[in-house]
Image (spheres, grey):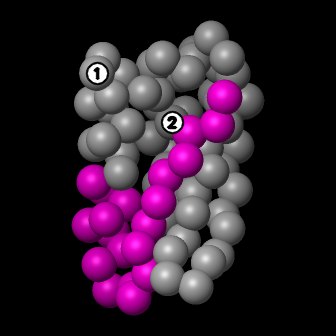
Amino acid sequence: MRELVAFLARSLVDEPDSVEVTVVEADRATIYELSVAPDDLGKVIGREGRTARAIRQLLVVGSADANKRPILDILE
């Protein structure tokens, strides 16, 4: 799932080399921390958060087999 988040983010931004995804495992959740260049932050979030919401929905669908809830944090 980490690669999926990185691929989607790299497809959206102008500086794909600055995309970093860190995975943090918690008891009941898997947290994906997405970091992009400051100028690309709006492109990853999207208008009214639609792009971020779509990425989060893909994470939920992709991790349906796991017993942990996926969380996407977009870091500033």
- Left or right of 9 on screen, residue 23: right
* Alpha carbon separation for disc pair 1 and 2: 17 Å
Q: Is residue 24 left or right of residue 61?
A: right
For the point 55% across and 33% down, the residue is 10
Total tally of numbered discs in the picture: 2
Q: Residues within 10 Å of mark 2 (few under 14, many from 20)?
A: many
- For label 1, the SS is helix
Measuring from the top left, give residue 50's x and y in whole percent: 27, 30
Instruction: Tell me the element at label 2.
Output: helix
On screen, residue 23 above or below 11: below
Magenta highlight on residue 71: yes
Could you say which is closer to the camera, residue 76 or residue 13? 76
How far from the left and from the top, in percent, is residue 48? 28, 21
Q: From the viewer's perspective, is residue 36 above or below residue 1?
A: above
Residues drawn in magenta: 57-76
Tell me where residue 11 appears, x and y as whole percent.
47, 31
Numbered disc in front, either 1 or 2: 1
